[in-house]
Image (cartoon, rainbow, N blue to C red):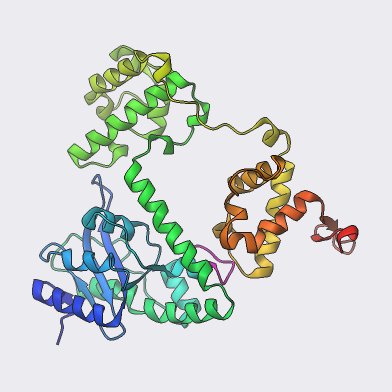
Amino acid sequence: MRPALIQQQDQLEDFCEEIRSHGIVAFDTEFVSEDTYQPELCLVQLATPESCVAVDPFVVDLAPWWQLMCDPAVEVVVHSAKEEVRFCLRYANAPPKNLVDIQIAEGLRDVSYPLKYERLVARVLGRELSGSETRSNWRRRPLSSRQLEYALDDVRYALEVWQIQRASLQENDRLWWAEEEFRRAVDREVTEFADGDWRRLRGLHNLRPRELAVARELFYWREQAARERNLPVRRILRDDLLLELAKRKPTTRRELLSGRDFNRRNIQTNASDILQCIELALALPEDDLPAPARRPRRSDRDHEVVPRLLGIALAQRCAEMSVAMNLVGTTRDLHDLMVWHQRGRSGAPPLLASGWRALVCGDYLTDVLRGRICVRVDPQNPRAIRFSPHEEHR
């Protein structure tokens, strides 16, 4: 009989064969990320239609599992796959090829997104799960029976949830929506994982090119220092302090440490490296400076009412179609749709006019922009706004 906790290599290899024979597996992880550069993988949970196990990565080589995760013949069912995809990229050097995210799937058949795993299982299966080990120390060995039971619950019901979701999505011709969105979620993690892109820092649109150069130098130095010391990047230099340095551009230790919140041990320890980064950025020729970050168009600022109106229309449309609005698009996506429409719909369609989103809201919101759909206030309830076809387009 297979143990609930796999701690021997041959046991994992046997279980991987079982996974391969079924062609489907539920997958989850427990990890610790508070004090390391990258999350430390502490436990892997796997479930087939017949078995549910945890694998101890401290004593077992997980290579056979990572190979399976990259096998397009094996459907890997997860909940909120961000870290699981990144573990696959890190240890297999490749993305998962056939990933299913039940959190995304639920958002394509109901307005609630994102749902925690416990709430999702309760909604779909009517089962109540305990969340008592959410703050557990997963590094500690041996794992307690309570820890193990909690961890296994994270995969025990996932396949049953997906079976119900898949039938519902297929019945409503939305399964291809889900497949498209699963691929997009993986692609997003692949891009973010590979790039280490300094432009993901928030607030760059307020910086001039020379300040952007400082931010770029500090970003890449911070990444390297955090990797070498195995510390979270925020322990080397917080984002807000990095941006403040880019604006101030101090050139001496005294200037550096004189700023508010800068007289910290980590700043003092790294002062010479920080000043060297700033010096390098200040010495760059004008032609080598980064291009300015994208700023909101003046027309966007002058017509903020339009995206807000589109947001109301999108909310009502998503409610009518039982799709989660915050899965469909963001305020930035509404701006992009409006600008695309203003430019005569030239160039590549924005997100809201592409794929399954075009069916949900792309044409609908475009009709709002063209005046084919009118906004009406309900005379019986002045707070209620309705969108209906213009008389000329009925």
Question: Hey, which quadrant is residue 98 in on the image?
Answer: bottom left
**58 over 73 or under it: above or below:** above
Q: Is residue 351 visible?
A: yes
Question: Hey, which quadrant is residue 95 in on the image?
Answer: bottom left
User: Which quarter of the rendered picture does the C terminus lie within?
Assistant: bottom right
Q: In this rendering, would 341 be left or right of 370?
A: left
Tag count in the figure?
0
Q: Main secondary structure of the magenta part?
A: loop
Image coordinates of residue 219 in percent, x first then y, are 33, 31
User: Which quarter of the rendered picture does the N terminus lie within?
Assistant: bottom left
Image coordinates of residue 272 in percent, x first then y, are 23, 19
Determine the residue positioned at 55% across, 68% down. 108
**18 over 323 or under it: above or below:** below
User: Which region shows up in magenta?
Assistant: 107-114
* Front one among 111 and 389: 389
Determine the residue positioned at 39% across, 17% down. 249
Q: Is residue 52 visible?
A: no
Determine the residue positioned at 50% across, 82% down. 167
Image coordinates of residue 354 in percent, x first then y, are 58, 56
Image coordinates of residue 135 in percent, x first then y, are 30, 61
**271 over 386 or under it: above or below:** above
The question of residue 110 being in magenta is answered with: yes
* Front one among 66 and 305: 66
Question: Hey, which quadrant is residue 270 in on the image?
Answer: top left
